[in-house]
């Protein structure tokens, strides 16, 4: 369906051309979403920045998300899952501290001393390379909302139908190219879907500038 993230970004940008020349900021979700967001920002000729959500993994199973955060002030916990796994409040508190430090580390690594772009009264297009559960996208949306944008758009190449339906209620507009009937993982819709490295993210950010 998509050759790679660059191809997905170019296809996604075609669905967002009505925003060209407007007061827009594109936000990429690292790591893979940054490659996609670059193509969107380039096509619209607008500035690009990052929002860096992190999931809170279950004890002994870090891949199972029991929550997510984009800052210490923007945290979402799946209370039902937390309770069913009997996860302690102390564990959650420790993970929030740990992941908040990782968010700071990543922003410093990716952007150095460059300050975040002002999102107030802007049209913000939040971009990722695809949605699965949508949990990290939800907390990213919450973080961006706190910056008081004029309009918030979530733009992704692919999403499961249930995630699409849920997140559509959280944003002003959801642009998604494909909502397939059978969804196993984002990577199944890409011919080439390697893990994006920190160095690739830094390269994209250093190379991109508004003309």
Image (cartoon, grey):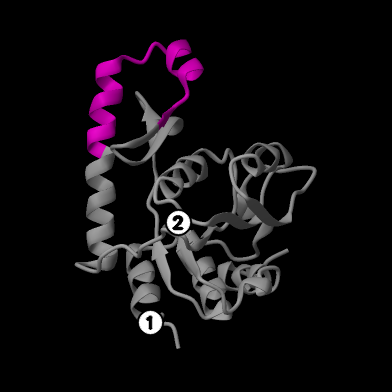
Residue 75 figure quarter: top left
* Residue 174 placement, left or right of 41: right
Residue 208 figure quarter: bottom left
Label 1 residue SS: helix
Q: In the rendering, at what x and y percent does residue 211 appear?
A: 45, 88
User: CB atoms at circles 2 and 1 under 8 Å apart?
Assistant: no
Residue 188 covered by magenta stretch: no
Mark 1 nearby-residue class (10 Å; few <14, some 14–19, many ≥20) = few
Q: Which of marks 2 and 1 is nearer the N terminus?
A: 2
Mark 2 nearby-residue class (10 Å; few <14, some 14–19, many ≥20) = many
Q: Would you name the residue on which mark 2 appears?
A: 29
Q: Would you name the residue on which mark 1 appears?
A: 207
Residue in view at x 66 percent, y 69 percent: 16
In terms of secondary structure, what is the magenta stretch mainly? helix
Q: In the rendering, at what x and y percent does residue 102 appear?
A: 26, 47
Residue closest to the eye, 203 or 70: 70
Residue 91 covered by magenta stretch: yes
Q: Is residue 121 visible?
A: yes
Residue ranking furthest to the left: 113
Image quadrant for the N terminus?
A: bottom right
Q: Which mark is residue 134?
A: none
Magenta segment = 76-98
Residue in view at x 37 percent, y 38 percent: 69
Q: In the rendering, at what x and y percent does residue 135 appear?
A: 51, 38
Q: In the rendering, at what x and y percent does residue 155 appear?
A: 61, 58
Q: Is residue 80 above or below residue 197?
A: above
């Amino acid at each position: 369906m998509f050759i790679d993230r660059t191809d997905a970004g170019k296809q996604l940008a075609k669905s967002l051309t009505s925003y060209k020349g407007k007061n827009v900021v594109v936000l990429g979700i690292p790591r893979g979403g940054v490659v996609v967001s670059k193509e969107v920002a380039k096509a619209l000729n607008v500035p690009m920045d990052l929002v860096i959500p992190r999931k809170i993994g279950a004890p002994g199973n870090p891949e199972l998300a029991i929550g997510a955060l984009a800052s210490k002030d923007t945290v979402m916990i799946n209370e039902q899952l937390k309770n069913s796994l009997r996860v302690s409040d102390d564990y959650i508190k420790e993970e929030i501290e740990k992941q908040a430090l990782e968010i700071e580390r990543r922003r410093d690594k990716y952007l150095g001393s460059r300050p975040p772009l002002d999102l107030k009264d802007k049209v913000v297009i939040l971009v990722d390379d695809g949605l699965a559960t949508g949990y990290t996208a939800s907390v990213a949306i919450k973080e961006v909302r706190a910056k008081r944008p004029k309009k918030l758009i979530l733009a992704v190449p692919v999403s499961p139908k249930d995630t699409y339906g849920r997140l559509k209620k959280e944003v002003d507009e959801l642009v998604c190219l494909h909502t397939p009937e059978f969804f196993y993982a984002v990577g199944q819709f890409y011919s080439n879907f390697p893990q994006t490295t920190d160095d690739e993210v830094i390269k994209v950010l250093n190379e991109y500038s508004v003309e």
